[in-house]
Image: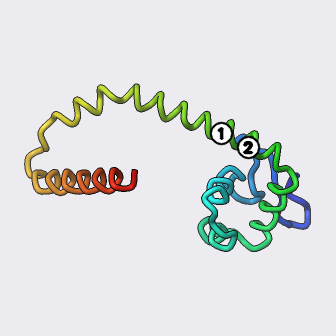
């Protein structure tokens, strides 16, 4: 699907994949929230979409479920591979940076950051 001359929302294939016309929002973005069981009204609000845009996206996903799901799985796999690549690539750099003392005058901010990290890690472990 592509943008019609009358300006109605449609689904277009771009370099980013299946995209809601007139936006940078892909159907894979929408799929993330559908999988998390967000209601369409909330998804519409999160992405600042019109009723027409969210309805077109949901209708396209429903009508082409197999194709969209296959592409979505491919996108998830690519994202996972990229995340793993950059985590591995930056592991040494992050370790070196973590060992460096804070810059002069930044001690209080550094301590606050460390407390926030500890709190975040504790929350993540309690939800696991």
Is the residue marked by circle 1 packed among few (<14), some (14-19), or many (20+) residues within 10 Å?
some
Residue 17 is tagged as: 2
Location of mark 1 (residue): 75
**Quarter of the view holding residue 101:** top left
Q: Residue at x 30, y 55 (%)?
A: 120
Q: Residue at x 33, y 50 (%)?
A: 125
Q: CA distance from mark 2 to mark 1?
A: 9 Å
Question: Is residue 12 found left or right of 83 in the rendered image?
Answer: right
Q: Are marks 2 and 1 in contact (CB under 8 Å)?
A: yes
Q: Nearer the viewer, mark 2 or mark 1?
A: 1
Is the residue marked by circle 2 packed among few (<14), some (14-19), or many (20+) residues within 10 Å?
some
Q: Position of residue 74 (x, y in %)?
A: 68, 36
Q: Position of residue 87 (x, y in %)?
A: 41, 32
Q: Position of residue 91 (x, y in %)?
A: 33, 29
**Quarter of the view holding residue 23:** bottom right
Mark 2 or mark 1: whose residue is earlier in sequence: 2
Q: Position of residue 5 (x, y in %)?
A: 91, 62
Relative to 53, residue 61 above or below: above
Q: Nearer the viewer, residue 33 or 8?
A: 33
Residue lying at the far right of the rendered structure: 5
Q: Residue at x 86, y 66 (%)?
A: 8
Question: Is residue 55 found left or right of 101 in the rendered image?
Answer: right
Relative to 100, residue 109 above or below: below
**Quarter of the view holding residue 90:** top left
Q: Residue at x 85, y 50 (%)?
A: 64
SS category of the residue bearing label 1: helix
Question: Is residue 63 found left or right of 116 in the rendered image?
Answer: right
């Amino acid at each position: 699907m592509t943008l019609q001359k009358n300006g109605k929302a449609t689904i277009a294939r771009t370099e980013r994949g299946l995209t809601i016309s007139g936006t940078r929002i892909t159907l894979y973005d929408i799929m993330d929230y559908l999988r998390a069981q967000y209601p369409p009204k909330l998804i519409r609000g999160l992405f600042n979409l019109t009723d027409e845009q969210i309805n077109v996206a949901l209708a396209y996903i429903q009508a082409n479920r197999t194709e969209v799901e296959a592409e979505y799985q491919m996108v998830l796999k690519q994202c996972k591979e990229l995340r793993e690549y950059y985590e591995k690539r930056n592991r040494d750099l992050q370790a070196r940076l973590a060992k460096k003392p804070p810059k002069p005058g930044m001690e209080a901010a550094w301590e606050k950051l460390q407390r926030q990290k500890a709190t975040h890690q504790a929350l993540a472990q309690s939800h696991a």
